[in-house]
Amino acid sequence: MHYDRAEIMKAAWVIVRRFHGNGEPFKSLMSRALVSAWDKARQKASVARRLEQSRREAETLAARTSSQLAAETTDLDNRSYLGHEGQEKLRALRAAHTAACEREAQEAKRALIDSARGRFASVTFTKKDGTERVMRVQPATLKYHVKGSAASEAAQKAVQARAERHPHLMPLWDAEAQAPRSVNLATISRIAVNGAVHEYAIH
C-alpha cells in the first residue's frame, strides 16, 4: 500500500501547531503527532482496502448466473454452522441471487421483443403513474430513427451512460405514435410476439 508521506507529515504538523505551547517538548510532540498521523493514514488505507475488496466481491457475484448463486446459497443453507462471515456471505448471495433473477428475466424479455425484428409486437407494461399501457412496437424500425454511430461523440457517450445507469430500460419504436419510447422491462406483464403470448407476474 502506497502512503503519501507528504500528506502524513502535513497532518503531523497540523497536530504540532495545535498543541504547540502546552509545555510538551517539541521532539516529544512531533513524535506523538507523527504516530497519530500514521495511525490515521493506516486506518484510511484499511478502509479503502475493505471497500475495494467489497467492490470486487460484488462484481464477482454480479457476473454469476442465478443458478450458480442458488446452488451456493443452498450449500450454505444446509450447513449446521456458519459463523458471522458465513452469515454475511449468505446474505450477499441471496441479494445477488435476487438481482440475477431480475436481470435474467429482463434480458429474456428484451430478447423476446427483439425477436420480432421488423414485425410488430405488443407489449403491456405499467407506467410510472401506475396505469397500464399496451404499446404496439416494431423493434427493428428504431434504428432508422436514431443517429447511432452518426451521432456526435458526446451524444454517443450520453446514450451509453444512460444505458449503463438504467439497464432495465429498453428503447422501442412506438408504431402507433411513430416515436421512440423507453419501456421499463421490469414492469412488462405481457408480450405478444411471433404468434405467441407470454405473460409475467409483476412484483
Image (cartoon, rainbow, N blue to C red):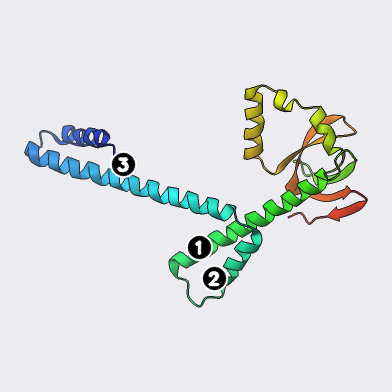
Disc ID at residue 194? none
- Amino acid carrying label 1: it is Lys
Q: Nearer the viewer, residue 103 or 67?
A: 67
- Amino acid carrying label 2: it is Leu
Could you say where residue 91 lies in the image, as x and y percent from the top left? 54, 62
Q: Does residue 42 sit above or below 72 in this rendering?
A: above
Q: Does residue 75 sit above or below 181 in this rendering?
A: below
- Taking the spot 15% from the left edge, 43% from the top edge, the residue there is 32
Quarter of the figure that contains the C terminus: bottom right
Q: Seen in the image, is 19 located left or right of residue 122?
A: left
SS for tag 2? helix
Contact flag, marks 2 and 1 (Cβ < 8 Å):
yes
Residue corresponding to mark 1: 89
Quarter of the figure that contains the N terminus: top left
Residue corresponding to mark 3: 2
- Taking the spot 61% from the left edge, 67% from the top edge, the residue there is 71
Residue 194 visible in the picture: yes
Q: Nearer the viewer, residue 15 or 57?
A: 57
SS for tag 1? helix
Mark sitting earlier along the chain (3/1): 3
- Taking the spot 90% from the left edge, 48% from the top edge, the residue there is 194
Viewer-nearest of labels 3 and 2? 3
Could you say where residue 185 lies in the image, as x and y percent from the top left? 75, 46
Gap between marks 3 and 2, in whole Å? Answer: 37 Å
- Amino acid carrying label 3: it is His
Label 2, residues with CA under 10 Å away: few <14, some 14-19, many ≥20:
some
Could you say where residue 188 lies in the image, as x and y percent from the top left? 79, 48
Gap between marks 2 and 1, in whole Å? Answer: 9 Å
Q: Residue furthest right?
A: 195
Q: Seen in the image, is 161 located left or right of residue 141?
A: left
Residue corresponding to mark 2: 76
Q: Residue furthest bottom?
A: 80
